[in-house]
Image (spheres, grey):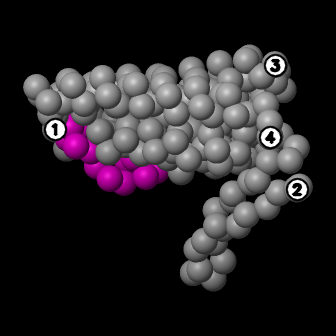
Amino acid sequence: MRRLRRPARTLCAALVWFLAQGGAQAASAASEGVERGGDVLQIVLPVTAFAMTFGLKDYEGTRQLTKSFLATMTATLALKVAIDAERPDGGGQSFPSGHTAAAFAGASFMQRRYGLRVGIPAYGAAAFVAWSRVDADRHHVRDVVAAAGLAVLSSYTLARPLPNNITVLPTADDGVFGLMFSGSW
């Protein structure tokens, strides 16, 4: 866990800086600032995840992230073409949200591989991306929820936590939903 403190602080600092920049933009043009913030964060999150794998010399993590990200984006694009749902603004290929899928692919990998210390701020940033897409009338809520679910499912299927990390797994059984925590100390 010791070696994850610096990346966690770096991620938090980058997110605070980014949100401060977005806050300045949002003051002049609220909706455009929120949408632009989501556009940027959907790239920043997976790039940050890749940078963490290289920075930590976690090359197995790099392979797992690559597989997970490609699976998420392939499924997202296939569903967009197959379903071709109408967007709230009248466009097509609304379901699921590509921006949200990319953001949650990065965030869910970081949480799965490196734990909650990194995962919580990453999920917060990914949730902002999802909200920005709904706020900008580019997607319905169902679009962003489905995209987040695809990304989380892909990360939890294709990535493994580093040893000594706490893992949080969504669980569902007979209409009961919750979270399961596991780890080793």
Q: Around disc 1, counting alpha carbons within 10 Å, would you say few (fewer than 14), some (14 to 19), or many (20 or more)?
A: few
**Which comes before the other along the chain, label 2 or label 3?**
3
Q: Where is residue 158 shown, x and y percent of the image?
A: 75, 40
Q: Which residue is the site of mark 4?
A: 1
Q: Which residue is the site of mark 3?
A: 57
Q: Secondary structure at mark 1?
A: loop
Give, as a three-letter code, the residue at label 3.
Lys
Mark 1 near mark 4, Cβ–Cβ under 8 Å? no
Whether the magenta-drawn stretch holds residue 146 is answered as yes
Give, as a three-letter code, the residue at label 4.
Met
Whether residue 7 sits left or right of residue 76 in the image: it is right
Q: Where is residue 152 shown, x and y percent of the image?
A: 60, 47
Mark 2 near mark 4, Cβ–Cβ under 8 Å? no
Q: Where is residue 89 shown, x and y percent of the image?
A: 16, 38
**Which comes before the other along the chain, label 2 or label 4?**
4
- Cα distance between the residues tagged 3 and 4: 15 Å
- Cα distance between the residues tagged 1 and 4: 45 Å
Give, as a three-letter code, the residue at label 2.
Ser
Mark 2 or 1, which is nearer the eye? 2
| Quadrant of the image containing the N terminus | top right
Mark 1 or 3, which is nearer the eye? 3
Q: Which segment did they paint magenta?
A: 134-147
Residue ID at (70%, 67%)? 180
Q: Which mark, residue 89?
A: 1
Residue ID at (52%, 42%)? 121
